[in-house]
Amino acid sequence: MTEVRVYRRPVPTWWWVRKRSYFVFVMRELSSLFVAWLVVYLLMFLWAVGRGASVYGDFLNWASTPWVVLLNVVALLFLALHVVTWFNLTPQAMVVKLGSRPVPAALVIASQYAGLLVVSAIVLWLVVR
Amino acid sequence: MTRRRIEPLVWLMFSGGGVLAAVLLPVLAVLFALALPLGWVSRPEHGHLVSLFGNPLTQLVLTGAFVLLLVHSAHRFRYTLYDGLQVKLKRTVAVLCYGAAALGALAAVVVVWSVG
Amino acid sequence: MADSIRLQVTRYRPDADSEPRLQEYDVPLRQELTVLDGLNHIKNEVDTTLSFRWSCRMGICGSCGMNVDGEPRLTCATFLSDYAPGPVRVEPLANFPVVRDLVVDLYDFMEKLPRVKPWIIRDDERSVDDGEYLQTPEELDAYKQFSMCINCMLCYAACPVYGLDPDFIGPAAIALAERYDLDSRDRGARERLDVLIEHEGVWGCTFVGECTRVCPKHVDPAGAIQRYKLKAAKESVKAFLLPRGAR
C-alpha cells in the first residue's frame, strides 16, 4: 500500500464545552470533587463532636458563616446532579429481573428514589429524636 | 482462566460509593452542612450525638461508607483528569488520586473511632 | 422552503494540503433530499474530485458516516430540510485520521474488532449433518439488540474517550462481544473477557453515553459496556475468592 499522509485532527482542550451533553457529563464527573469535600466536612464535624460540646457548637457556628454555606450549597447542587444522573443511568447499566420478568426502567429509577427517602428518613429520625 | 485483576474490584468500590453518594450522602450533607448550622432543625444535644456516633455499629457503617465514597471520588476524578484535562501522566494521576483516597480513608478511621 | 442550501464540505488532498479546509457548494434543497444526495450532486454536477464513502443509501451498510454540523450521522439518513436555511458543515467522521476529503482511515477499528472474537466459539464443532443449533425466540431476544450493529463507527466518532485515547477498544467492539456472549450457541465468554478485562478494554469507558445517543440502530453500546463491567467484576470477585479448581 502506498504511503498516504493521513491527517490526525487534534482534540481541543475545551472539547467538552462545545456540546451540551459533553458539558453535563463533565459536570457530573466533577461532582466527585464535591463528594470528597462533603466527606471531609463530615469528618471535620465528627471530629468536633468528639472534642466536646463547646467545640461542637463552635463548629456549627463556623459552618453557618456565608462562605462555608455557599460552598456546601454548591456541593449539594453537584451532589443532586450525581443523584439524578446515577439513578437515571442504573436501568441502562444493569438488567434488573424479578424472577424471569425484566423490571421496567421507570420502576428501577423510582425504587432508587424510594430507597433514598427511606434512608434519609431513618437517618433523620436517628439524629433529631 | 481469568487472571487476577484489581481494576474490576476498584470499579466495584466506585459503584458502591456511587450508590452511597446517591442514597446516604444527601441526608448527611443536608443535615450537618445546612440544617444544623442554619438552624432549620434545633441542634441535637451534644450527648445524644456522642452516643449516636460513638455506637460501634454506626462507626462501622460510617467507616465503610466514607472509604467507599472516597474511592468513588478518586476513581471518578482520575478519569476526569485523563479525559477532561487531558493529563497524560497516567500513572502519576492514578497514584495521586488513590493515594489521596487512602489518606482520607485513614483519617476517616481515626476520626470516626475517636468519638465516644 | 428555499430552492437550495449551502454545504461547507471538508476538502483535504494528502499530496497537496498541509491540513483540511472547508469548501462551499450550493446543492438543491427538496423535502426528500439527504446530505448524501447533496454530496452526490456535488460530485456528479459540480466537482468530481470530491471523495466520500457511501453504498446502500438506506441506512443498513454503515458506509456513509460523517460529522454533520458536528454530530456523527449517516448522511443517507440525514435530511437537508432539517438544516434549512443552512449552511451545513459536512466533515469527516470524528476521531479517525483523514485520508482524503471525507474519507477516514478505519484501520484501527478493523484491527480491534477481531480481538473480541465476534463469532460463535464452541468447544465442540458439530458437522452440518448433525443439523442446526436450535434457539428459542427468548434466547434470540437476549442478544438481538446488540446484533443490529452495522459497524458504521458513529459511536467511535461520538465517544470522547476514544477521541482522547485511541487505545480504547471502543463501543461497537464491546457491544459485539456482548452480542456473542449472550448468544446461547456461544461458549467463548471467557476468551472475550480476557481481552476486555484489560485496561484498554471496558475500563476506559466513563459512561458518557454519547455512543448510545448517536447509534442509528439503537444498539445501546453504553448499556452493553456497563453490563460487561459488572460481568467482569463478578468474575474477578470469583477469581479472588474461589480456589483455582472451582472457577
Image: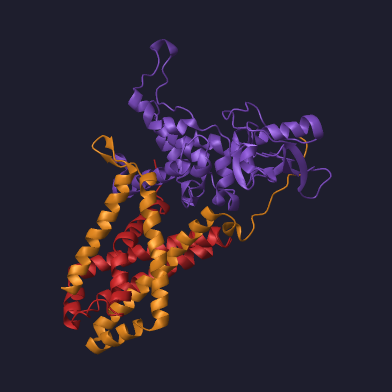
Quadrant containing the C terminus of chain C is top left
Position above or below: A57 against C94: below
Residue at figure coordinates x 30%, y 80% from the top left: B37
Residue at figure coordinates x 59%, y 53% from the top left: C164
Q: Residue furthest front?
A: C1
Q: In the figure, residue B114 lies in which quadrant? A: bottom left
The picture places residue A31, in percent across and down from the top left corner, at 43, 64
Position above or below: B66 against A8: below
Position above or below: C4 against C187: below
Query: Which tint is chain A?
Result: orange
The picture places residue C129, in percent across and down from the top left corner, at 42, 10
Residue B30: tell me if it is visible.
yes
**Left or right placement of residue A3 versus residue C142 in this view:** right
**Left or right placement of residue C166 versus residue C231 in this view:** right
Residue at figure coordinates x 20%, y 72% from the top left: A127
Of the pair C140 and C187, the residue shown nearer to us: C140
Q: Residue furthest bottom?
A: A54
The picture places residue C194, in percent across and down from the top left corner, at 45, 41
Q: Which chain is red?
A: B
Q: Which chain is purple?
A: C
**Left or right placement of residue C177 versus residue C16 in this view:** left
Q: In the figure, residue A65 lies in which quadrant? A: bottom left
